[in-house]
Image (cartoon, helix red, strand yellow):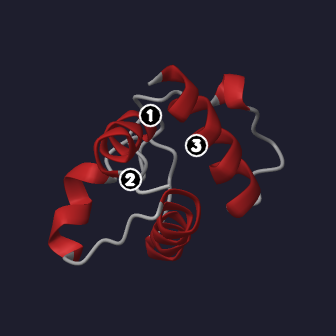
Amino acid sequence: MDQIIEQLKLQLIEALNWEDQTPETLNPDAPLFGNDASSLGLDSIDALEIIIILDKNYGIKLENPEQARPIFFSIRTLAEYIAQNRKK
């Protein structure tokens, strides 16, 4: 699981152009979305980038947008979903 989390951090930094972030600065349990100081502050465009990462790197297609909310809560919840559903 830790390996997936670290890979995901690197993929997010690259895809979202987080030039001021490193894998060490990203809390895997912080909420991805939201406006408070504890969240990573992503928006709907960023969610599309995550969907692309899931498809391109792991062969995962999200068929139902409603299922994305709990999966996209944090880097850790994304990694858990990847571990259970990856095709690549």
Crowd tier of the residue under label 3, counting other residues whose Cα lies within 10 Å: few below 14, some 14–19, many 20 or above: many
Position of residue 68 relative to residue 23, above or below, is below
The three-letter amino acid code for the residue at tag 1 is Ser
Q: Tell me the number on the disc at residue 38.
A: 1
Q: If the image is split into quadrants, where does the N terminus sit?
A: top left
Residue ID at (39%, 64%): 60
- Give the mark nearer the N terminus: 3 vs 1: 3
Crowd tier of the residue under label 2, counting other residues whose Cα lies within 10 Å: few below 14, some 14–19, many 20 or above: few
Answer with left or right where residue 59 lies relative to residue 14. Answer: left
Disc 1 element? loop
Tell whether label 3 touches label 2 (CB within 8 Å).
Answer: no
Given residues 9 and 39, the one toward you in this image is: 9
Residue, disc 2: 34
Answer with left or right where residue 80 lies relative to residue 23. Answer: left
The three-letter amino acid code for the residue at tag 2 is Gly
**Residue 40 at what x, y percent from top left?**
52, 45
Residue, disc 3: 8
**Residue 75 at what x, y percent from top left?**
45, 39
Residue ID at (31%, 51%): 85
